[in-house]
C-alpha cells in the first residue's frame, strides 16, 4: 500500500551536503543509503497516510508560514550507529535548533498531526543497515540554516517533494506557537 509522510526539515547547504555524503560513503556497504539530495534534519513529522494527504498538506503549509525564528547555526560532529541506521548528530545541544523544532512540533500537535510518540533528536540519517551500535567523533560539518522546508515523502519510492520553504528570519507578527 502506498504511504505518504509529511515533515518539516532543515536541509544542509550544498557544501555541507557534499561533506556529509563523503562521510556516508566512507562507512561502507549498506542496505540502503540516503542520497545527498534527501539528506535532512527532521524537525517535526506526521503519521503516514495511505492516500494523498491534501488537506493536511494545506494545513502544514499554513503552519510553516506562521513560524518566526532566527537562522540556525548547525554543527554535526558525531557519527552514531544503531542496530538499523547510522546518523550524523551534534554532540551538544543547539538551542536555536531545539527552539525551531519546538515551534514546529507545537504547530503540528495543535493541528492534531504530530506523529504519536515522536521525539525530536536532531540527526541526519546517512544509511540503513544491520549492525552493532557505535559512536565516533568527526571534524564538525556545519552550515547556517537560513530556511526550513515542508517535505512530502513517499517511503519505499525514495522520493521527496518539497511543498514549501520559509526563510528563518524574525518576522514581526509571526506566531511562535
Image (cartoon, helix red, strand yellow):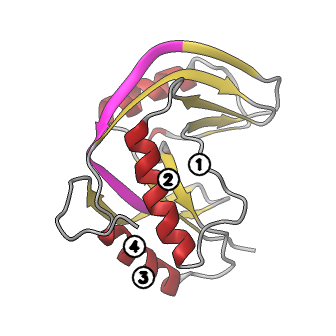
Left/right placement of residue 123 relative to residue 76 reads: right
Marks 1/2: CA distance?
Answer: 7 Å
- Residue 25: mark in rendering: none
Marks 3/2: CA distance?
Answer: 18 Å
**Other-residue count near label 2 (Cα within 10 Å), few / some / many at <14 / 14–19 / ≥20:** many
**Other-residue count near label 4 (Cα within 10 Å), few / some / many at <14 / 14–19 / ≥20:** many
Residue visible at 39% across and 73% down? 63
**3 vs 1, front mark:** 1
In front of the other: 66 or 36: 66
Residue visible at 66% across and 69% down? 47
Q: Earlier in the sequence, mark 4 or mark 2?
A: 2
Marks 1/4: CA distance?
Answer: 18 Å
Q: Are marks 1 and 2 in contact (CB under 8 Å)?
A: yes
Q: Earlier in the sequence, mark 3 or mark 1?
A: 3
Left/right placement of residue 89 relative to residue 164 reads: right
Q: Earlier in the sequence, mark 1 or mark 2?
A: 2
In front of the other: 26 or 101: 101
Magenta range is: 138-152
Percent coordinates x, y for residue 4 in the rendering: 61, 71
Residue matched to label 2: 43
Marks 4/2: CA distance?
Answer: 13 Å
Residue 15, compared with residue 61, is above or below; it is above
Say which quadrant the C terminus sits in: bottom left
Q: Earlier in the sequence, mark 1 or mark 4?
A: 4
Q: Are marks 3 and 2 in contact (CB under 8 Å)?
A: no
Residue matched to label 3: 58
- Residue 120: mark in rendering: 1
Residue matched to label 4: 63
**4 vs 3, front mark:** 4
Percent coordinates x, y for residue 158 in the rendering: 59, 54
Q: Secondary structure at mark 1?
A: loop
Q: Secondary structure at mark 4?
A: helix
Amino acid at each position: 500500500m502506498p504511504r505518504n509522510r509529511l515533515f518539516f526539515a532543515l536541509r544542509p547547504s550544498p557544501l555541507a551536503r557534499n561533506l556529509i555524503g563523503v562521510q556516508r560513503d566512507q562507512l561502507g556497504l549498506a542496505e540502503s543509503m540516503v542520497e545527498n539530495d534527501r539528506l535532512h534534519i527532521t524537525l517535526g513529522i506526521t503519521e503516514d497516510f495511505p492516500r494523498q494527504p491534501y488537506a493536511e498538506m494545506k494545513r502544514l503549509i499554513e503552519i510553516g508560514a506562521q513560524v518566526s525564528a532566527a537562522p540556525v547555526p548547525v554543527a554535526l560532529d558525531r557519527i552514531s550507529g544503531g542496530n538499523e541506521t547510522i546518523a550524523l548528530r551534534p554532540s551538544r545541544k543547539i538551542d536555536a535548533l531545539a527552539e525551531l523544532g519546538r515551534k514546529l512540533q507545537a504547530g503540528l500537535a495543535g493541528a492534531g498531526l504530530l506523529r504519536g510518540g515522536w521525539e525530536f533528536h536532531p540527526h541526519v540519517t546517512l544509511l540503513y543497515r544491520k549492525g552493532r551500535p557505535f559512536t565516533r567523533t568527526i571534524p564538525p560539518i556545519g552550515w547556517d540554516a537560513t530556511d526550513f522546508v515542508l517535505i512530502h515523502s513517499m517511503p519505499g519510492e525514495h522520493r521527496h517533494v518539497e511543498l514549501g520553504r520559509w526563510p528563518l528570519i524574525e518576522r514581526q507578527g509571526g506566531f511562535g506557537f
